[in-house]
Amino acid sequence: MEWLGTNLADKYLTYKKNDAEARRHYFESVSTHNRRMIYLLIAFLTGIVAFMSVLTICEKVSGDALLFLVGTITGYIIISVQRLVFPSEEPPSEETKT
């Protein structure tokens, strides 16, 4: 009967080890994806601001428009960083019909 307990314990430890490995792999994949998206986002927004700056220097666009664009992009970046740092992993609640 003792072999049954050790066999079950070994199976449980193997299961937990595989579960931990799967979670680690998942979080590595998610963090790699988030990092790539941030790099792409930074490059894209930098390109837009640079293009608008060139248009402002050439006096095709007013400085107010550039200031508005930079403020909007700054707010977007702050919200994006907040979502990455503090993700809402709450499961969606089911609506109850009354």
Image: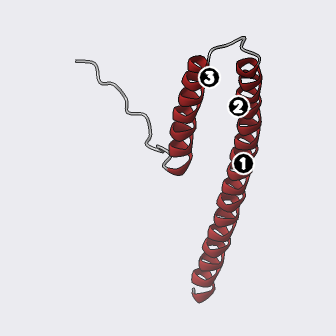
Q: How many marks?
A: 3
Q: Is residue 30 above or below residue 41?
A: below
Q: Is residue 66 left or right of residue 55?
A: left
Residues at circles 1 and 2 in contact by the CB criterion of under 8 Å: no
Distance (Cα) linking label 3 and label 1: 27 Å
Q: Residues within 10 Å of mark 3 (few under 14, many from 20)?
A: some
Label disc, if present, on residue 78 of the rendered structure: none
Q: Secondary structure at mark 3?
A: helix
Q: Position of residue 12 (x, y in %)?
A: 60, 72
User: Where is mark 1, residue-wise?
Assistant: 35
Residue at (59%, 79%) from the top-left corner? 9
Q: Position of residue 16 (x, y in %)?
A: 62, 69
Q: Nearer the viewer, residue 80 or 50?
A: 50
Q: Position of residue 35 (x, y in %)?
A: 72, 48
Q: Amino acid at mark 3?
A: Leu
Q: Secondary structure at mark 2?
A: helix
Residue at (52%, 40%) from the top-left corner? 78
User: Where is mark 2, residue-wise?
Assistant: 45
User: Where is mark 3, residue-wise?
Assistant: 66
Q: Residues within 10 Å of mark 1 (few under 14, many from 20)?
A: few
For discs 3 and 1, the disc positioned in front in the rendered view: 3
Q: Nearer the viewer, residue 78 or 91?
A: 78
